Amino acid sequence: MKLTDFSYNLPKNSVAKYPISPRDKAKLMVLHREEQNVENKGFTDIADYMSEGDVLVVNESRVFQARLFGKKEKTNAKIEVFLLRELNAQDAIWDVIVDPARKVRIGNKIYFSSDLWCEVIDNTTSRGRTVRFNQTGNIYRAVENIGLTPLPPYLKRDAEESDKTNYQTVYARVDGSVAAPTAGLHFTDKLLEKVKKKGVAVAPVILHIGLGTFRPVEVEDLTKHKMDSEFFEITKESAEIINKAILAKKKVFVCGTSTVRVLETSVTAENLVRPNKGWTDKFIHPPYEFKITKALITNFHVSESTLLMLVAAFGGTEFVMKAYRKAVKDDYRFLSYGDAMLLL
């Protein structure tokens, strides 16, 4: 497969700048892979496709307020610090991106509030730095009120107070993502209860989504593309819930491409799921044989993105790209705050 196989034209007015309210009123495009047909539904209809004994796997990573604005010691120059990942919790050491980078050197201190500042201790890339915060403990909580929601750059707007809630799944629990697992944004507590009442188990996993999710693929030959490594975890309890469904020949509904990558990174020789924890740079693109995922819930993704490639690997490139063109024509809302797709 080549990069251009995943290209489509997305009109500017098809990009959703804000979510639908309530969130479960988004539209749902249902793709039946065997029949090669498409249905237009509402997201609340998703429970109708689930049966007793099935399992819904979700990514409970929480988006933290990763965008900070501070002032450099002595000069008071305004510096943006984008928190990427925690390297050492005990010593409060983080990987970050700074802007403007030319003003930020090793030894500089950047102040965010009267009681929170960081010192630059290393350079990593042209804009990348390693910093040590003056506070130890939970930096995620320390930046909760002074940081901004790290909205995707393609929304082309500043984060608002409502984004703190809107750009977060209702089941988000563990801080660590700088981009939301957007397929899950459509679920409400009420809809999840409806799913559970059908006898569908919900199994949480974690994958902390990094900025690499927005990084463009710059090679035509996909085998040469390298994914960023992202931290993930699947517990013994969740693995057992998923395996119970697999062994009973029930469906595994996977919510989001990040969740797919957790499961497909954690496959046993018997095509079951094992408890697992670590870092994954798994890149799924056609052709790929899915071992665990039997139904996929996802959003409409950016042209030529790794997310779209994973969806195409599951649904079939030609079928998925045809559905995308239909979605544009049928006024579906695209990208993070947009509508949803279910592939069966």
Image (spheres, helix red, strand yellow):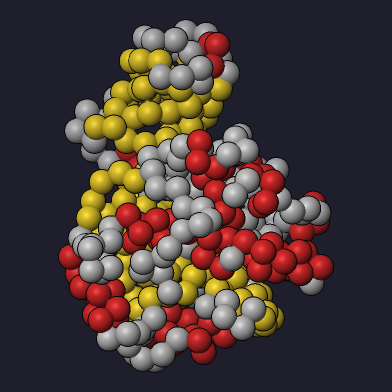
| Left or right of 255 in this view: 160 | right
- The quarter of the picture where residue 14 lies is bottom right
Residue 45 in view here: yes
Residue at image position (59%, 55%) is 308
Residue at image position (48%, 32%) is 82
Viewer-side residue, 217 vs 232: 217
| Relative to 137, residue 236 above or below | below
Viewer-side residue, 43 vs 115: 43
| Left or right of 144 in this view: 44 | right
> Horizontal and vertical percent for residue 339?
64, 68
Viewer-side residue, 91 vs 214: 214
Residue at image position (52%, 78%) is 344
> Horizontal and vertical percent for residue 68?
49, 33
> Horizontal and vertical percent for residue 292?
36, 68
| Relative to 275, residue 90 above or below | above
| Relative to 243, residue 281 above or below | above
Viewer-side residue, 55 vs 108: 55
